[in-house]
Amino acid sequence: MTTTPYRWVLPGTPSLGVVAPRAGAGAGPAGSAVPPDEAARRAVAGVLAELSSGDHRGVVVDSPPGAGKSTLVVRAAGELARAGEPLIVVAQTNEQVDDLIDRLAQAEPDLPIGRLSANDYTASERVRHYSTVRVAAKVADLGGSSVIIGTAAKWAMVPEGRWPWAIVDEAYQMRSDALLRVAGRFDRALFVGDPGQLDPFSTVETERWVGLTWDPMQSAVAALLRHNPELPVHRLPVSWRLPASAAPVVAEAFYPFTGFSAGTTEAQRSLSFTTAGLGGGPVDEALELAASTGWALYELPARHTLRTDAEAAAACARLALRLLERGAVAVSERDPAGRPVTADRIAIGAAHRDQVAAIRSQLGPAGAGITVDTANRLQGREYDVTIVLHPLSGRRDATAFHLEAGRLCVLTSRHRHACVVVARAGIAELLDAHPSTEPVHLNVPVKFPDGWEANQAMLARLAAHRTTAR
Amino acid sequence: MSTLVALARAEAVAAGFAQRTTTVRHLHVAARPLVFVPLSMAGEANAPLAALVGTDPAAPRLLVVPQPRNRDQRFRFAAELAEVLLPYLDSFRGVAEAVPVNRGKEIRHRYVDAPQVLVPNPAGIQFTRLLGRSTRFRRTDGDYPVHPSVPLLGRWLTFLADRAEHPGSCLLLAMTEALTLHWATGQSPLEDNHLAALLAWIDPPDGLTGAEAAARAEDPLTWPPAGPLTDPTFDNEVLAPLIAAYAEAGDDPGRQARAREALAEALRGQLAPTWRLMWRGLALLRDLPPGARVAQRWAEDRDAFTGFASYLDEGGHPQPRRDGAVVAAQRLHRLERALQSYAVQRAYDDPLVMADYRLTGEAFVGEVTLADPNRIDDSGRRRVLRPRIMLRTTDPVQVTPGTAVYSPDRPQQKARVVLVTPRPDGTGTDVVLELTGGLGRALTPAPGSVPEVGERVCYTTLSDGFMPPGEFPAREETPWTHGGPPTADEEAVEPTAEDALEEWE
């Protein structure tokens, strides 16, 4: 097996990448002597100080998976609103809007909040039970609200009004053209997001705009920074979600220049089973390996398959169901006494919708509560245990879609305890046969990490946690 | 490639002939299209070498550039092309129809017909785009003046090439794309770009299978490449000596004319086979019955043509070199909307296209087993007609209760999924739907508006409904996040004297 990844650019090489580190911002690098909660506190304080100083029209905060992005948004919104600055919040999906409202209303019980929504939106339970939250389809009907929250699509329909401040949440998921449509609504803005997530995409050919600084296919943050390179970029240094076993792996593969560390120690998190594995064979081996080390690679025999590989789908389903049968219990800083890993704490992730459907049909009624979804839809979500159908499993080729670093990053960074990757053998050889062949365009910033390299790095780490299916 | 197209390709291999992937034609084919087969010179970026162009299959006009490296001759080529293309475009500006807009409060006009330009392949569209780019900023005075028709030609070519990116538009079409939209061959999509091989699979000569005919079409002597790039052997052995002979003729008019004639004959030989293939392809497309929504999309094309013609009448400047931030975002928005509605319309027009959505669970076809057309819902403030039907389907149903679905047969009507019940004996699924809209005004449904028991109906989550256009800031109000207002390169402005000096290779 040739799984030693090599780097084309040494870590720390500056300025080639648009997401490369910038001087004078962010907390210290991962692994510094500062305790995690202190490092995180300092980073948040730095962001808030920068906001209140008013030196810049925009402040960008890069947040690795589970680094307290929402907490930061809620705190920043609270502080700006308390300072008497009317404020809008732009999120990307209705789900995210409801989440934010729920957290903000809880943190700031006296703050009048407005939810801008489509005409056919019916308020979800968690929004309705706050008396401080008003829901309306027009800004005019949200008069007394200090904070107005809506999706980017909804804000794009608001033709007038200008607020001193905006917070743009999940700004790396937002397309540059979506930002263009809402940017007239605010003077200054805080942009928060995870640079390791999936890039925005379009169904049409967009080559025409490649190389332009306002290429509508970039993320909102990329466009913003290309036009305003002087804006400060902060970084949240600690992941509270990823366990100590996963943070260094994910950081090395997907955040090679900036890194981050785990907020918890190995001793604080553990996964155990209430029943012994009898007759489960490799499935139990994989689960036990995942429970003890945080990772497992459940490897099926090498074979070229259809996208909806029935054996792989069945393996994903079996692993998830077995986890339920074995009565897994997760101990963490939140639940020091342990909490059962129920179906709603398990997710299965895949690259394509038809794979999701195939896995779902294999799960049957016993696994009804288990989340099965594509990487795009799993963005921003969190589970105790995830099972991932590797995007390259059983493929003959490695296309840009399947190599995209963001896809693998989302899939392998949703878990608090353990992640089991299901794959056909031979991915390393497939990668070696398909080096990145994406054309390089003039005036397009090189994007890091490279998907091919990230895949190699991830695979090299997983190789040590392999269980071979028989 | 969808599952059904993959299947059709496999069947084409097995049968030896191309297989239809649609039941109807999803393109408009004009009554009087203009066919344009351009050739460019190898090694020179988009340097025109020759073209066959015209609307009469029996009388194409041959344009030749004897020395493609010569700027003046290139612009003469552009002027000659304009002599054919501009009168053709103008010929559609006779009769206009009135179209009510803004709910009938205003009226706008659009021409009853529009031009249609056909090139052999996507590279031909690219050639058109680049020729437009190189000619639209030319000036007719100052240094390097060109014929007044040249910059106008450039604007039209740019318009056509821009419009070709618009999903469902038929003003400028590549023949290979038009054919592969309707047929699947047993060769790779890359090989389908060779017009001769593609047509061999679809319509082989008597006594040959498509596969055999396609193998013969690989011989560049009988079937020269459809351009714009020429066959390298032809370049070396025929073209290079002829261009050299023309250069050696110098100022001797007799020798020059003979050299030019020899060159023209050689190039005609390269172009004529493709010219014939273009008209054969056109005839094959004409034979297909058009889809129901093709005319609607052609009306949009006519609108675009009318709009651009009046823009030029008002002295419109050439299209800017590149899109500004707002223009790019608006264009992307328009293209995405067009792509979505084109996909939905094709599925609505064509059961074979819809079948693909049935495989993925986004559509299902079934027989109505129960119908309650007069059902009244009186749970709200007002009594309303809400008929329900139940249908039985053997398709994989992926929709969940509460989902809105639509039927291509009754596009004005919306149905809401009430219940999805797999039949216990495994013979399919029962789906209960509640219908709203398109029922007439009374509390009893208009005749035919509710599917009857025994009727086979199709329901899908794809909606052909109106999508409101997005709102964008004005160009001059481009926000600070996107670099502020656009510069001259992103605005349509009068070309300057410097533009004439621009290298246009």
Image (cartoon, grey):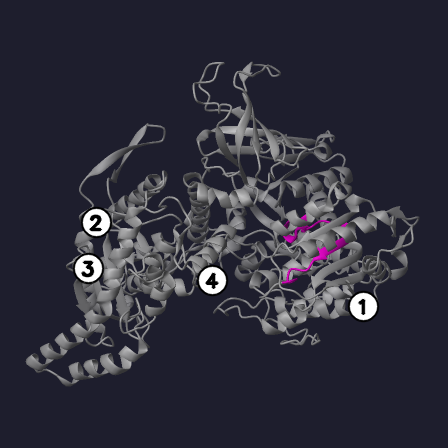
What crowding class fits label 1: few (fewer than 14 Cα within 10 Å), some (14-19), or many (20 or more)? Answer: few
Mark 1 and mark 2: span between their CA atoms?
74 Å
Q: Read off the residue under disc 3.
A: B82
Q: Read off the residue under disc 4.
A: A210
Q: Can residue A172 be spotted in the picture?
A: yes
What crowding class fits label 4: few (fewer than 14 Cα within 10 Å), some (14-19), or many (20 or more)? Answer: some
B25 vs A367, left or right, is left
Mark sitting on residue B32: 2
Residue at disc 1, secondary structure: loop
Residue at disc 4, secondary structure: loop
Q: Read off the residue under disc 1.
A: A32
Mark 1 and mark 4: span between their CA atoms?
39 Å
Q: Amino acid at mark 4?
A: Val
Mark 2 and mark 4: span between their CA atoms?
37 Å
B266 vs A137, left or right, is left
Q: Nearer the viewer, mark 2 or mark 4?
A: 2
Queried whether the magenta region covers residue A359, the answer comes back as no
| Residue at mark 2: chain | B
Mark 3 and mark 2: span between their CA atoms?
18 Å
Please state, as top left, top right, bottom left or bottom right, where the C terminus of chain A lies in the image: bottom right
Residue B107 place in picture, x, y as percent:
28, 32
Mark 3 and mark 4: span between their CA atoms?
31 Å
Whether labels 2 and 4 share one chain:
no
Residue A135 place in picture, x, y as percent:
64, 31
Whether labels 1 and 4 share one chain:
yes
Queried whether the magenta region covers residue A379, the answer comes back as yes
Asked which quadrant contains residue A265, the reply is bottom right
On screen, B390 above or below B330?
A: above
